Structure formats: C-alpha cells, structure tokens
Amino acid sequence: MSLVELHAIHKSFGALEVLKGIDLSIDEGQVIALIGKSGSGKSTLLRTINGLEAIDDGVIMVDGKKISERDTDLLALRLQVGMVFQQFNLFPHYTALENVMLSPQVVKKQSKAEAREIAEEMLAKVGLADKMMHYPDQLSGGQQQRVAIARALAMKPKVLLCDEVTSALDPELVNEVLAVVRQLAEEGMTLVMVTHEMRFAREVCDKLVFMHQGRIHETGDPEEVFSNPKTPELSSFVGGLA
Amino acid sequence: MAYKFDFGAIVPHWELLVDGMILTAELTVIGAVVGVGLGIMGAWARASRAPVISQIVGVYVELIRNTPFLVQLFFIFFGLPALGVKLTEFQAAVLAMIVNLGAYSTEIIRAGILAIPQGQIEAAQSLAMNRVQIFRYVVLLPALKKIWPALSSQIVIVMLGSSVCSQIAAEELTFGANYIQAINFRAFEVYFVVTGLYLVMSILLRMGLKVLGNYLFERRRHV
Ligand SMILES: Nc1ncnc2c1ncn2[C@@H]1O[C@H](COP(=O)(O)OP(=O)(O)O)[C@@H](O)[C@H]1O
Ligand SMILES: [Mg+2]
C-alpha cells in the first residue's frame, strides 16, 4: 500500500477547473518530480496533498487513512506531510533556531531542550550549524531555504512536498539547496517536488509526472520519459527547455 | 482695562490638578490595556473566516466609530442604569474608553494582520499548527509591530478624549480644571496650565509607548 494515494482529485477556482481528475500514488521512499508548464496545476496539486487547498471531489489517503476536511484530520495529515515553498516563508521575528523549534514545541509539545536538540541536528544537516542565531533577514536566500527545509524536517514528516524550492534563488545559490534535497533523497526521504531543474529530476527522482492542463499527461521513469517522450506535449516541453 | 494674569491663583488648588492627572493616567492605562486587548480579539474575529462573529464585531466597530465619544459615555453612565447596570463615574469612564479604543484598535490591528504575508500563515499551517497557535506565535507580534505607531497615536487620542469624562463628574484632569476656574474665575490661567499638563502627559505617553514597542519588538532570542 502506498504512503499517499490520490484518487480522482478535482479542483476548480470558480469557473476554472485546475485539476481534472488526478490519480497518483506515492510510495514510501519514492522521489517524485512534478513538471509541466506554468499554470498546469502543479502547485495546486501539491497543496491538495497537505490540505492547503480543499478539493472539490476525490479521495486522499495517507497511510491508509482517508482525509476529511475536518480540522483534526487536517492537522493529523500535516503532521505526516511537510512542505517547503518557493518563497521560504520563514517567520521574521524568530531566529533560524527558533523557526525550527517552534512547531515541535507548540504542536508536538516537546520540551525546549528536546526541541532544541532536534533543531540543532536538522540545522547541522542542512549545513547551517553556524547560522542558528541569525534572523531570516540576515541570511541569504539559499540559507533561508535551507532553514525552511530544516524546519519542515524537525516535525519528522513521512513525506516532504517541495514547490519550486530553488525558483526564487539567484543562480549561484541553487546548488546548495539542491544538494540538501539530493541528500534527503539518498537518505530515503519520500519527496514530491515541483521543479524546473530537469537535470536534477533526471538524476535524483524515481518517477516523473508531467502535468498538462490539469491532468497527468505522462508519467514514468525519468530517464525513459526524457529520452523517449510519448506525447507531443511532453516532447515540446522537454524540447523547449533544452 | 487690561486683564491681569495671576497664575498664583492656581497654586492653592494644585492638589486637585495632581489628583486629576493621576485619574487621567489611571483611566488611560486601564483603557489602553483592556481596549487594545479587546482590539486584538476583535481584529482576530474580523480577520477570521467565522462570518457571524466577524459581522457582529463589524457592527460594533462601525457603531463606535460613527458616534461621538461623549454620547457613548452618556449612554453608559446615564443610559445603562435603565437596564439595571449602575456604574460609578470612574467605572463608566473606563468602560467608555475601553469600548471606544477597542473599536478603533480593532480596525488598526486588523490592518496589521492583513499585512502578514499569506505564505507565512501557510507555512505555519504546513507545520500542523492550529488557528490559535498560528495567531499567537506567527501573526500577532509582527502584526502589532507593523501598526504600532498608529496604535500608539490612537491611545494618545483616547487619553486626550478622556477629558470629556469630566461631563459625568469623573474627577480627571479637566474636571479639576473646570472646578478650579469655577472657584477663582481664572479661566485663562487654569486652562493654560492644564493645556501644558495634557501636553506633558501626551509626550510622556508617546515616549512610554515607544519604549514598550522597542521592548516588545526588539530582537530578543527566546532560547
Ligand atoms: N487561489 C487561486 N485562485 C484562483 N485561481 C488560482 C488560484 N491558485 C491557482 N489558480 C489558477 O490555477 C491554475 C493553476 O495554478 P498552479 O497550480 O499554481 O499552476 P503551476 O504551479 O503549475 O504553475 C492557474 O491558472 C492559476 O492562475
Ligand atoms: Mg506553481
């Protein structure tokens, strides 16, 4: 049984149907790349997985349990599913360390010492052991994004969703963030990432999902899909990038 | 015949002015603390997605912001006894100030809340925080920081507005002034001095709020 299963997910914003029946299963330890043109529904799909976007129709199962719209279900869901955003979204009034410690303390009711230990471990993991006492505006974009990853990891999620985590970064800062994601993938973390880094997707991901106009248009092993796209849409999408 | 100034005529009544200042200060501190607390709750209700509560608070805000403070005060002091709520002058004055500041600060603080980037709230949601936790740990302090100057000004306005509480014989500073000039007929001198006293109190209040703001929003490590 898969860790996360999406069945026939539909989502509209007003008259605009953004997700037109998505089926997707995410296995434990799998690293999935979600690619597609801007506006194809990638972010919306990702956001439905942790309940930031309510769905109109369909079923989401996490760990074999169906997720309803009740607040308690959503909170339980989000304990399993972490998310990192394009715009880092660190809390500006807390240091890096406090950003990472906050949720373990207030949500998981960990003691300060316990939360601190985990936070220091996570910040060390993303290479920021020496920046723990810095505030977000004292950090570069790449460093902020790594804090955001550490913050999500400190909650020990089973799945991590990454929505274009390098798109807001200056080119020279992209690699330090990708290196962290690559390390997570190698450690067996389950990842779903929206990305435009095709080389990275090819090297790191187990499964490629190409979205087009609110549907999963093509999916498969990255190597295969890239070298031998079956649909003209993916072909032109990949070609347009090269 | 020229008017002869005689500021000395106030001296025998100085205690009345000091007592008045103290009462004005008390009204202001209680009114500000409870009023801003009410404003925080009101702003949260307005910004939340609970439509009924939000609308009730909306009506309260508009009612208070579109009626004179003096009428609100009279309503509380002279009107409420009809419902069996009999308040002392001080209680009525404090309540009027709380209700008044609560409405204005609801709108001010709401603007601060709306200025918090949605992404930060979504990040907090993704970390499995509930609404209360998000408001308390992620939204409140940065929101207050954004609107602290506006909120400070409103608190000063409310302190100055407390002068109308003399109309229900709450013995604050303006009441003292009215009383003294009724005895010694030295209106110019009395109101000249009282104007200066309000000015001093305003400046002190502004300074105090600035210090409080620095304390609240200064970068303090919590661990
Ligand atoms: N909150 C929203 N309200 C209205 N329309 C939205 C909202 N979020 C996304 N959309 C629309 O849904 C479509 C898909 O958006 P999105 O999922 O962000 O695409 P992608 O991440 O693939 O670029 C776009 O047309 C976008 O304008
Ligand atoms: Mg997107």
Image: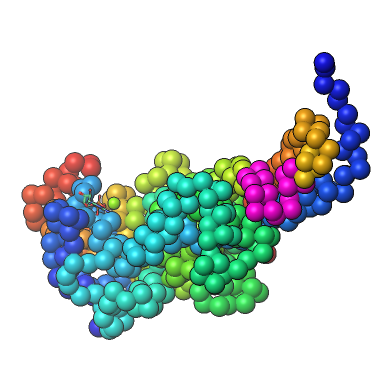
Residue found farthest to the top: B1
Q: Of residues A122 and B122, which is closer to you in this image?
A: B122
In this view, A29 is above or below B105: below
Location of the N terminus of chain A (image quadrant):
bottom left
Q: How is the image coloured?
A: rainbow
Q: Is the C terminus of chain A in the top left, top right, bottom left or bottom right quadrant? A: top left
- Classify residue A216 by image quadrant: bottom left
Which residue is located at x 44 percent, y 67 percent? B131
Which residue appears at 59% of the width and 72% of the height? A115
x and y percentages locating residue A29 in the rendered image: 34, 73
- Of all residues, the one furthest to the front in this rendering is B1
Image x and y of residue A82, in percent: 40, 67
* In-image side of B203 versus A70 (left or right): right
- Residue that appears at 24% across and 74% down: A60
Is residue B174 inside the magenta stretch? Answer: yes
The answer to which quarter of the image holds residue B123 is bottom left
Q: Is residue A45 visible?
A: yes
User: Which of B95/A161 is in front?
Assistant: B95
**Rendered position, A119 above or below B117:** below
Where in the figure is residue A190, as x and y percent of width and height?
35, 70
In the image, residue B46 lies in the stretch drawn in magenta? no
How far from the left and from the top, in percent, is residue B96? 58, 56
Residue segment shown in magenta: B160-178
